Image (cartoon, rainbow, N blue to C red):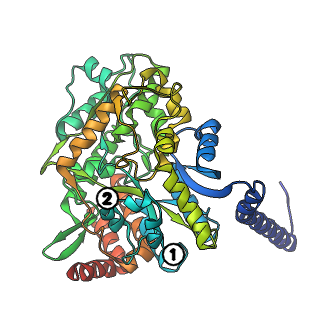
Amino acid sequence: MIRTKGGDRGLFATALLLLVLVFLVSLLSGCINRDRQLQASDSDRTYLSVLVPLHFPQPPSKEMVAKIEELTDMRLDLRWVPEGVYTDKMLTGLTTNSLAKVSFVKVSDYHMVKNAIRSDVFWEIGPYLAEFPNLSKLDPNILDQTAVDGKIYGLYTERPSSRQGVILRKDWLERLGLEEPKTLDELYEVLRQFTYGDPDGNGEQDTLGVVDRNDLVYGIFKTLSSYFGTPNNWKIEDGKVIPEFMTDEYLNTMNFMKKLYDEKLINSDFPLTSKEVQRDRFIRGEAGVLIGSMTDVQRLAIEARAINPDADFTLVNRIKGPYGYKVWSIPNFNGLYLFSKKMIPTEQDLRDALRFFDRTMDRDVANLMKYGFEGRHYRTENGMVILPEETSQLRVNEVNPLYSLMIADISNPNIMEVAQKEHLTQIAEQLSKDNEAFLVDDPTVRLSSPTYDEKSAELSTIISDATYNYILGRIDAEGFHQEIERWKQSGGQVVIREFEEALSRR
């Protein structure tokens, strides 16, 4: 241990602070200069840096990226950031003005960058789209959903309205003689039996009903909440805008989660658990249920069977609650690629960046990004794609991360149809389509609240902390109500008023 006198301690602290500042400045400088250095290293191709979320254990293969560079005549600097920390990384880049030329913004984070958009940080791309054969055909309805003050700033990544559902260990259900759950009560019973009924047959009580993570949206809470009939973020009733957490249904969801926590049917550390740890615990058979995107099931099954060949999975999308079937939805996009004015200084540079994304929608590039190399990752029969089970892991490792980079792919007519998919993937997609029958939309998608755009992070933290504290038993219903009042006083009441004013103008 270093012992110092008072004066020495002050000098030591000052020196340490200076070292930290020097490190941060050099790190920031390195990020800012990265584009210039890499651009200068290859003058034959246009250089483009892109900040992209990574939803898989590793980025796509170098061969895949090299082929995309060749076909698009671009030099790509794809900056892959794990999805679990993506929001923090993106917001840090925004605050320090060190974003890539093009940066992805998740739909759940979009309100946090709208003031930056209004402050001219990003290019308005709407007037340029007509110049490109593919971008000019983007869905005007989805573009309208993304608009800020009537202007288009981003290229959207298209997704089904809802892929949310329940992924279960089918072999555990069979071992315990249980049916797939169809109601909230049956889901609870499955979770209880998966915890205390020795579903893995090893004679020990070492399993959990469900494993969750530190995310009230893409973890299990919001999907359960929609089963209980909670509005999707906001509710409009008689011209009044009501936040979801001020409804009885939200309280009922918290009580259900509290019951799971109190009875130890869920991992007790879920408020601190990352997505990666959540997935790993499910893959390793520590829990029998994962609630979230059903399209993850194929990859989860592959990794689980590598550990336990007997692991088997099933999917359920219809869980009946007090109001029948409900499931929350996103708009028809799950995020946007925005174009930095600092890193893209001229209109020609912007056109070059847009040209890349337009080119990715052409038949050769789009199918490469979607399916990989023919003969290695897939094969074709009668002009249709066959995705064999035996190359599924290869696609996960080498191709599938590129899905995050694709724009408007669902409605892109250049993408080949699939004649045969992996069994679980096909079921997940069928059930996602079935979700369309009972979607719960966010009614404020086309409404504007400048205060919400400015203070959403602060306001969301108040409610998420209160929600966790209620579930963990640290506050009661009265304590939760007090946090709602604090939310109102911190700007929430102004947000409600602005939404209601925007509603009256429509």
Could you give the CA–CA distance between mark 2 and mark 1, rounded to whole angstroms? Answer: 21 Å
Identify the disc placed on residue 116: 1
State the residue at coordinates (33%, 53%).
471
Quarter in which the C terminus is drawn: bottom left
Q: Secondary structure at mark 2?
A: loop
- The disc, 2 or 1, on the residue closer to the chain's N-terminal end is 1
Q: Quadrant of residue 266?
A: top left
Which of the two residues, 307 or 95, is positioned nearer the viewer here? 95
Q: Secondary structure at mark 1?
A: helix
Quarter in which the N terminus is drawn: bottom right
Res. 457 visible in picture: no
Q: Amino acid at mark 2?
A: Pro
Residue underneath mark 2: 331
> Residue 289 appears at what percent x and percent y?
34, 34
Q: Amino acid at mark 1?
A: Ala
Q: Quadrant of residue 25?
A: bottom right
Residue 49, placed above or below residue 197: below
> Residue 293 appears at what percent x and percent y?
36, 42
Which of the two residues, 344 or 100, is positioned nearer the viewer here? 344
Crowd rating for badge 1 (residues with CA inside 10 Å; few <14, some 14–19, many 20+): some
> Residue 427 appears at what percent x and percent y?
29, 32
Left or right: 322 in relation to 51: left
Residue 247, placed above or below residue 423: below
Left or right: 405 in relation to 225: right
Which of the two residues, 24 or 294, is positioned nearer the viewer here? 294
> Residue 285 appears at what percent x and percent y?
42, 27
